[in-house]
Image: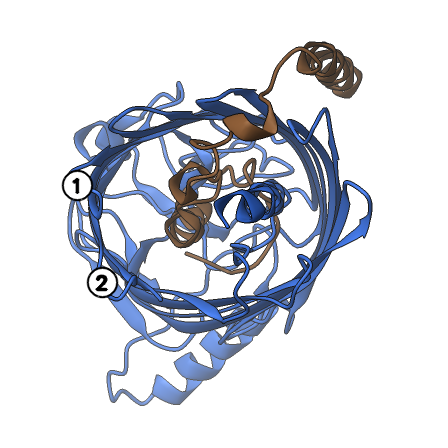
Amino acid sequence: MQLMNKPINISSALAAATCALLGAPNANAADTDELWKFDTALMYYGEVDRVTAVEAIIGATKDFGDEHIFSGKVTIDGLTGASATGAVAQPVAQTFTRPSGDGNYVTGAGETPLDDTFHDTRVQLTAQWTQPIAENMRASGGVNFSNEYDYMSFAVNGSVAYDLNQKNTTLSLGLSYAFDTIKPEGGIPLAFSSVAIKPYSDDSENEQENENEYEDDFNRTRVDDSDNKNTIDLMLGLTQVINRRMIMQFNYGLSLVDGYTTDPFKILSVVNEQGLTQDLLYENRPDTRTRNSFYWQTKYALDFGVADISYRFATDDWKIDSHTIDSRLRINLSDTSYLQPHFRYYQQGAAEFYRPFLMEGDNVPEFASADYRLGEMTAYTVGLKYGMELDNGDELAFRLEYYQQTPKNAGFNEPGALQDVDLYPSLKAVIAQVSYRF
Amino acid sequence: MRHKVLKISSLLLLVQLAGCASLGVQPWERDLLAKDEMALDAEGVDLALDDHIYFSKEATSGGRAFAGGGCGCN
């Protein structure tokens, strides 16, 4: 029985490995039984003073026999909280109008401006089918749909994987096409137009006049209701068994983005030589982006568990280079339980059009964004997972992690008042997760 | 730049392929590799959740899987 099962296990593992490297959802191939397998998780993500998210995943996989595998996944997440707008902190309180144009909020002196109206629910559905198409060859195809209040994404993917060298080597080629539409409340802002500030209601005789003037100003900053972008991804993969204990994976990914990549909610402060804000402008990013990524992963079977380490180098024509090291060490506590420390380190350079602010009197560049996520930063994650197999064979796991981002000044001089405020505040978050597999 | 990247990646792939033939194990030596926790995507759900977090908080995504679009994450 053991011997009969083994080859199937191996090819299932390779199929799952290939799916992973081709961007397919977890196609955790079933053994010989034909029962549905479910992977579920509930995650809480909470940033200090900013975004809070709760995300639930239900994944299902079924082997219909002869490695004809279906896998599907439903993800639901709810987000709420505040997000950095891109505007700089000032020595005095600042009033901002919400991106929708409806209502104002005030940021205190010395505080980083955060838009506190961030609230969204997202539903994502994925389905993937994988099956052999020839000897030592598998094909996989899938769809991915994601919808939230102001954003929708639809993607299809296809891939083939070829085993050689006694299935010690697997080559794969995958393609994906995604179409995303964004429809922000209040519409798409005109690049580098001045943000209109809504007048406060003051019961004065001019109130209606002021309101009308504001609406005209606001409408002048709008170009459209919605915009979209196309993303084509190509991925080449090589999976190689090194020896009885070690397996490696190499991926090269090329990603071509064409369309609206600007964040309609992000703005830039225009400051004078004293560092005081004179104007607020909507940001503007290039409408294409070409990304290259190189990914290497190694898993090593230890006597007491598994070591898993990966490194990714990514570079793109926005001139953002990044390095990521991700590592997990599974330590088996018994036959049915384990502890797994996790460490991740991330470092990125700034996009060539990243500007923490613009200077009054300077020419407005072709592209500019003060979104700190396009600036220079380092980030690390430390975490611990505890997993156990229950008496009925189901698996239960708990994960707790801490994530910290430390943005850095990419070489910009800070005039006057900006030297006294924190332009690059750190972001700290806690991730807590419960997973159940049955 | 793009040509350079292509050249380097093609070279890497060739070197890897040449090396592959002498690597690997016999079918009866797969006892450890066949364990669930040795699958490259053994942490599937965790990885999907992590990808979503880092996709929305950092400028780089993908590598392990498609970089794709997917959400208007803030």
Residue A273: which quarter of the image? top left
The residue depicted at 27 percent of the width and 83 percent of the height is A201
Give residue A142's position: percent from left, percent from top.
68, 61
Instruction: Please tell me in which quadrant of the rendered image residue A304 appears.
Output: top left
* Residue sticking out furthest to the right: A134
Indicate left or right for A410 with A404 as reference. right
C-alpha separation, residue under disc 2 versus residue under disc 1:
55 Å
**Which chain is indicated by disc 1?**
A
- Of residues A57 and A35, the one nearer the viewer is A35
Q: Chain of mark 2?
A: A
Q: Earlier in the sequence, mark 2 or mark 1?
A: 2
Please name whichever residue, A271 or A18, is drawn nearer the observer in this view of the structure.
A18
Identify the disc placed on residue A334.
1
Q: Dot 2 surroundings within 10 Å: few (below 14), some, or many (20 or more)? A: some
Residue placed under numbered mark 2 in the picture: A106
Q: Can residue A207 be seen in the rendering of this structure?
A: yes
Say what secondary structure mark 2 lies in.
strand
Mark 1 neighbour density, 10 Å: few (under 14) some (14–19) many (20 or more): few
Name which residue lies at 44% across and 22% down.
A245
Residue A262 appears at what percent x and percent y? 58, 51
From the rendered image, report the letter of the chain displayed in blue: A
| Element marked by disc 1 | loop
Q: Amino acid at mark 2?
A: Val
* Left or right, residue A340 beside residue A279: left
Which colour represents chain B?
A: brown
Q: Is residue A194 above or below residue B29?
A: below
For the residue pair B60 and A244, the one nearer the viewer reads as A244
Q: Quadrant of residue A421?
A: top left
Residue A34 at x, y = what percent?
55, 69
Give the residue type at disc 1: Ser
Report the disc number at residue A34.
none
